[in-house]
């Protein structure tokens, strides 16, 4: 399972299904680090725990302007917000 977040979920289909919507010339980002968008990732983790999910999950980065910062933000969110749900 891959994990991403977005702050642009309500874009029209012409944008959402365009080729490479995560790459824009003006710097607009489609995908964000987990916890910085609008998706209910805490709710997702609660459901995964409820159903006994024990598999792997990958974090995906598309269009990050600073990959190292994205990784640090993600690690913080995983450790401090999502992991406690499973503990």
Image: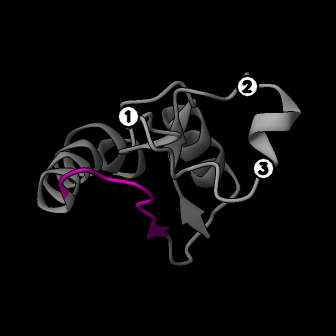
Report crowding for label 2: few under 14, some 14 to 19, many 20 or more residues within 10 A (C-alpha). few
Decide: is 81 above or below 56. Answer: above
User: Which numbered disc covers residue 64?
Assistant: none
Say whether marks 3 and 2 touch (CB < 8 Å).
Answer: no
Query: 53 or 31: nearer the eye?
Result: 31
Residue positioned 36% across, 30% down in the render: 36
Mark nearer the N terminus (3 vs 2): 2
User: Which numbered disc covers residue 11?
Assistant: 2
Query: 67 or 57: nearer the eye?
Result: 67
Residue positioned 25% across, 50% down in the render: 65
Under circle 3, the secondary element is loop
Q: Mark 3 points at which residue?
A: 18
Horizontal relation, residue 46 to residue 82: left or right: right
Report crowding for label 3: few under 14, some 14 to 19, many 20 or more residues within 10 A (C-alpha). few
Say whether marks 3 and 1 touch (CB < 8 Å).
Answer: no
Mark nearer the N terminus (3 vs 1): 3
The x and y percentages for residue 47 are 65, 44
The x and y percentages for residue 17 are 82, 48
The x and y percentages for residue 5 are 50, 42
Under circle 1, the secondary element is loop
Under circle 2, the secondary element is loop
Alpha carbon separation for disc pair 2 and 1: 19 Å
The x and y percentages for residue 3 are 52, 57
Magenta part of the chain? 58-66
User: Which numbered disc covers residue 35?
Assistant: 1
Horizontal relation, residue 68 to residue 32: left or right: left
């Amino acid at each position: 399972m891959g994990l991403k977040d977005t702050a642009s979920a309500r874009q029209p289909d012409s944008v959402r299904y365009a080729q490479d919507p995560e790459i824009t010339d003006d710097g607009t980002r489609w995908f964000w680090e987990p916890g910085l968008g609008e998706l209910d990732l805490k709710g997702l983790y609660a459901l995964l725990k409820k159903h006994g999910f024990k598999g792997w999950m990958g974090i995906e980065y598309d269009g990050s302007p600073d990959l190292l910062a994205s990784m640090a933000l993600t690690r913080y969110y995983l450790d401090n917000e999502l992991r406690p749900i499973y503990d």
